[in-house]
């Protein structure tokens, strides 16, 4: 059996890729990922409820954008390296709607996962989450297909989350 004793693994250009602490904790400083929220200050639909359907949601409160992969102007997370990506969307439906609510997570403008809720006139959480295999240059978006979303100034009732998992 062999033991490799290192504290850091780097690319030949000196960029740190992996660090191992003395306690055995492994960190990777640059995992492509984003976490964004939809607020009443977004560039598409500032009304509350948000009712824009049939187009990519442009989340405007960017909390994490490691690798600069998410663009607020397009609503796209552009994949920088091939791999499997975890995608999650969370929304709160609005109480004023008497219709079903549906969101779609898309890869390159093709739906690959939907979240659906048929409870009317109540605040109900609407979720979509999936793993998707991508190549560099693919893009991931979320879209409201039907219904109405409750949004707030701080964006606490909505989120879009994408990260490389392997």
Image (cartoon, rainbow, N blue to C red):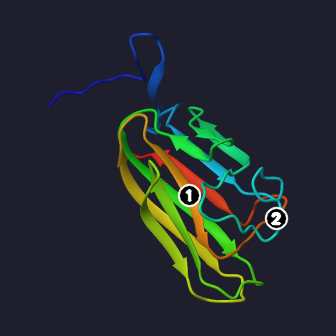
**Which corner quadrant of the image does residue 17 belong to?**
top left
Tell me residue 31's x, y (percent).
Answer: 49, 36
Q: Image point 69% across, 88% down: which residue? A: 98
Quadrant in the picture for the C terminus: top left
Which label number is shown at residue 152?
Answer: 2
Specify whether residue 166 is in view. no
Tell me residue 72's x, y (percent).
Answer: 68, 43
Q: Does residue 84 sit above or below 130 in this rendering? A: above
* Residue to which mark 1 is pinned: 142
Which label number is shown at residue 94?
Answer: none
Question: Along the line of sight, which residue is nearer the eye, 152 or 108?
Answer: 108
Tell me residue 35's x, y (percent).
Answer: 62, 49
Specify whether residue 64 is in view. yes
- Whether residues under marks 1 and 2 lie with C-beta atoms below 8 angstroms apart, the answer is no
Quadrant in the picture for the N terminus: top left
Count the numbered circles shown.
2
Q: Does residue 42 sit above or below 54 in this rendering? A: above
Q: Nearer the viewer, mark 1 or mark 2?
A: 1
Looking at the rendered structure, the secondary structure element under dot 2 is loop
């Amino acid at each position: 059996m062999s033991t490799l004793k290192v504290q850091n693994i780097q690319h030949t250009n000196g960029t740190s890729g992996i660090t191992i602490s003395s306690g055995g904790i492994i960190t990777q400083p640059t995992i492509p990922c984003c976490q964004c929220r939809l607020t009443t200050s977004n560039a598409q639909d500032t009304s509350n409820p948000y009712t824009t359907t049939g187009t990519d949601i442009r989340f405007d409160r960017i909390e994490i954008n490691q690798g600069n992969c998410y663009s607020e102007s397009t609503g796209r997370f552009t994949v920088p390296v091939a791999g499997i990506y975890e995608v999650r969307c969370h929304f709160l439906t609005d109480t004023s709607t008497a219709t079903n609510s549906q969101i779609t997570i898309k890869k390159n403008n093709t739906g690959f996962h939907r979240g659906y809720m048929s409870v009317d006139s109540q605040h109900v959480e609407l979720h979509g989450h999936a793993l998707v295999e991508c190549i560099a240059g693919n893009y991931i978006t979320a879209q409201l297909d039907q219904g109405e979303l409750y949004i707030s100034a701080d964006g606490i009732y909505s989120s879009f989350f994408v990260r490389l998992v392997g």
